Image (cartoon, helix red, strand yellow):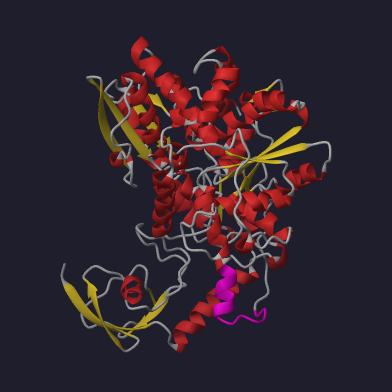
Amino acid sequence: MNMIELTINDIKVKAEEGMTILEAAKSVGIHIPTLCHMKDLFPTGACRICVVEVEGMRNLTPSCAYPVTEGMKVQTNSPRVRVARKTIVELLIENHPQDCLICVRNKNCELQDLSERYNVREHRYVGEKKNHAIDISSPSMERDPAKCILCGRCVRTCNEIQKIGAIDFTNRGFKSNVTTPFNKGLNVSDCILCGQCILVCPTAALRERSHAKEVVNALNDKKKFTVVQVAPAVRATLGEEYNLPIGTNVTGKIITGLRRLGFDKVFDTNFGADLTIIEEATELINRLSKGGVTPMFTSCCPGWIKFAEQNYPHLLEHLSTCKSPHEMEGAIIKSYYAKKMGLNPEDIFVVSIMPCTVKKFEASRPELSEEKMPDVDAVLTTRELVRLFKVAGIDFNDLPDDEFDNPLGESTGAAAIFGTSGGVMEAALRTAYFKLSGKELENVDLTNVRGFDGVKEFSVDINGTTVNVAVVNGIGNVRGILEQIEKGESKYHFIEVMACPGGCINGGGQPIHQKPEKVQKRARALYEIDAKMKNRKSHENESLKKLYNEFLGEPNGHLSHELLHTTYVNRKKILEEL
């Protein structure tokens, strides 16, 4: 790569040819603020907050979109630049609701940060403001157009990364808006409720639909037996909200915090993950040995399920019928555990702590209930749990470690890696290999399915039979795989799909971030948990063996199908009829 030399703020800088001014400045520790910029996506230069002064150019230049040239002289902090940026921020603020004190993104808002950075201390502009209704049609997400600053990051994420296209710009000038087609609710759009747009939104224009009030009411109801379960990805991310190193495993502190909130029992969704693997691996083996429909897709990600129902209903028979881990755990809590403890299932209130927004939608599905009693009563995101801890006056960093309650708290290393792309596949293969061959894998670290490539492929020989698998990382990469199946050209037997790039560790309910390296550290934490576990294969879970012996019988048996498996809906037809 050719190197060129330029000057930024009187500092000599060597930069790669083709770099933008923004990238060159960052390489020497010079910060330039951005709003519309998204790493690895083609720059738009739309927000203009990143403008700089380039010698010889009459107008200020958007640094995110302008390439460096030999001998270029740039000022990123001249009086002219500061005035321009401050004016942009002031204009955004004047067209923004003035409710920072009660906003869910208070102290975690990029517009608020820019206001502080540029010392905005008065309202200098007065005029008409946007006035839009809040979209609360979805059980997972809320959309508040009045708080939208038109940076376009949500639109680009939905269209270019996730490739869903549920939202886009409409109208022009002052009337510009980001909305769904025909300005209908998210619940009747193509949105899969993955929440990736929330992670990139600089304000609270997009946010999760909170279930905190329902959870607090249940905790205060003495007639309710409150049970909470924690997803694998949450333990590797929640510590970030308390300034702990990225990827810190805070499992023990989460358990203690939940007990102090008042929950009667604290279980591990990893138990449900191990249970899912037993059921899913058995289902895969049955399909392979009995000529069932293949390839079989995993069904743990409700965003992927919703996408398939809305776009490829003719391929729904390829989906595993297994419920997701937290739904399986909820079903077992309200059946096996209730019976074992002499509890009335209707008095049990199950809460799932999830890294995901679409899990809220999943919990509301009528297919995931027994006699109108839902498997899971409420879902809290990682962010919501942090807010509950703060309200309760819990100093998280000083909490001692504790352990999950049993019997639904035991888990294996295989369950821990469910939270990252490729983890479900790796866990399933560890058990499928044993069930098909009667032997244990010599090396359980199946690194071929790890990592963040869009599609990962792997073949494993089991008793002379080659099983071809694929891992789809991010819903934006799945259409090619589905088109192969439609054409009858697929070579795969088993396919994992995670809607969020990186998997659940990067779910829409996780701490807000825009740094890919964070996701990598989170994934590393889950693999470290797995590596340290005594048992690393789901079929080694002793509490799970006891569950089958005492209650379920055999995997994929009658009772298992009744409690742990589900059906799907042709949502494409439903949306067309609306």
Q: Is residue 514 above or below residue 480?
A: below
Q: Residue at x 52, y 46 (%)?
A: 167
Q: Is residue 114 magenta?
A: yes
Number of numbered callouts drawn? 0
Q: Residue furthest right?
A: 222
- Where does the image place residue 292, in percent across and percent down from the top left? 38, 13
Q: Residue at x 45, y 69 (%)?
A: 34
Instruction: State the quadrant of the N terminus.
Output: bottom left
Q: Residue at x 48, y 23 (%)?
A: 279
Q: Is residue 160 above or below residue 54?
A: above
Q: Which of the 4 image quadrants contains residue 96?
A: bottom right
- Where does the image place residue 69, in percent across and percent down from the top left? 23, 76
**Which residues make up the magenta segment?**
111-124
- Where does the image place residue 305, in percent across and percent down from the top left? 49, 31
Q: Which of the 4 image quadrants contains residue 329?
A: top right
Q: Is residue 296 above or below residue 11?
A: above
The answer to whether residue 287 of the structure is visible from this angle is yes
The answer to whether residue 501 of the structure is visible from this angle is no
Question: Which of 473/7 is in front?
Answer: 473
Give left or right: position of 553 versus 456.
right
Question: Which of 99/255 is in front?
Answer: 255
Question: Which of 92/174 is in front?
Answer: 92
Question: Which of 336/505 is in front?
Answer: 336
Q: Is residue 535 magenta?
A: no
Give left or right: position of 171 versus 534.
right
Instruction: State the quadrant of the C terminus.
Output: top right
Q: Residue furthest top?
A: 290
- Where does the image place residue 166, in percent across and percent down from the top left? 51, 43
